[in-house]
Amino acid sequence: MPIRPLSHLDLRQLVESSSPAEQQRAPDEAPPSSIGAAFRPPGPRDDETRRRERLDRFAFLLDDAFRIPGTERRVGLDALIGLVPGIGDAAGALLSSYFLYEGARLGVSVATLLRMTLNIGIETGVGLVPVLGDLFDFAFKANDRNARLIERFLDDPESTHRSSRTVLATVAVVLLLLMLALVVGIAWLVSALVGALSGAV
């Protein structure tokens, strides 16, 4: 039996007899495509998740990558770099500043960023003290602290912002009291010296 070629009428009937789902689709509606979904650019939430994971990995590398033999304590590259005299602490502070950069990109509040900066400053400042600074660096782990601060802010911005402001206010009061005590001490010392010199004359 010879094969009859499809005519224009036959093609029209085939189109009209397509599935109900095809008939209900709007003329300008593109068919669903799983391939297109795979190449769709990631949304904001996906980008935030990737940044969180990157920060966690970096904090682990800097503060917890290696276990001290015979103990449960862990140290990272930051503590090892800090052992290098002169440039070790400065290099560690530079690496730690990455958390400030990512925190700012993720919308962390100014108070929380200042608190993170305070953590880096404390670790760097104490790290300048020989031996004691290195031991403090092993225990303080500013990068872990800052990674957790970013996580907490993203999960609960208001509470983390308030706690950061409280910490900063407490530190400011302590510094003010120390400065006041220093001024009083210097004034007392000068007064004692003047009295001693006056008595000697």
Image (tube, rainbow, N blue to C red):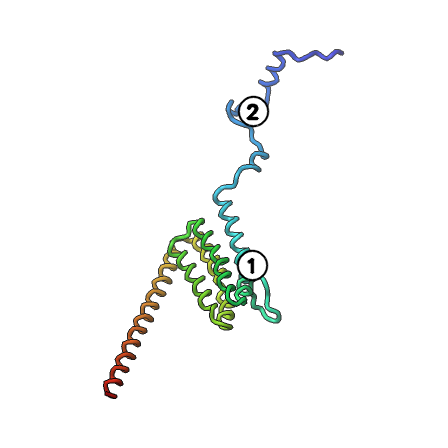
Label 2 sits on residue: 22
Asked if 39 appears above or below 63 in the picture, the reply is above
Residue visible at 62% across and 15% down in the picture: 11
Foreground residue among 110 and 34 = 110
Decide if residue 74 is in sight here.
yes
The C terminus lies in quadrant: bottom left
Q: Amino acid at mark 2?
A: Glu
Q: Earlier in the sequence, mark 1 or mark 2?
A: 2
Residue 174 lies left or right of residue 139; in this view the side is: left
Q: Give coordinates of residue 74: x percent, y percent.
A: 56, 66
> Please, what secondary structure does the residue beneath circle 1 have?
helix
Residue visible at 52% across and 39% down in the picture: 41
Foreground residue among 200 and 131 = 200
Rendered image: mark on residue 10: none
Asked if 38 appears above or below 134 in the picture, the reply is above
Decide if residue 144 is in sight here.
no
Find residue 158 and report its image quarter: bottom left
Q: Give coordinates of residue 87: x percent, y percent.
A: 51, 63
> Please, what secondary structure does the residue beneath circle 2 have?
helix
Residue visible at 49% across and 64% down in the picture: 89
Q: Give coordinates of residue 127: x percent, y percent.
A: 48, 68
Nearer the camera: disc 1 or disc 2: 1
Q: Amino acid at mark 1?
A: Leu
Mark 1 nearby-residue class (10 Å; few <14, some 14–19, many ≥20): some
Label 1 sits on residue: 61
Q: Given the current orientation, which residue lies at the most extreme right position? A: 1
Q: Given the current orientation, which residue lies at the most extreme front position? A: 201
Foreground residue among 126 and 5 = 126
Mark 2 nearby-residue class (10 Å; few <14, some 14–19, many ≥20): few
CA–CA distance in space, label 1 to label 2: 54 Å
Residue visible at 52% across and 48% down in the picture: 50
Q: Give coordinates of residue 169: x percent, y percent.
A: 34, 62
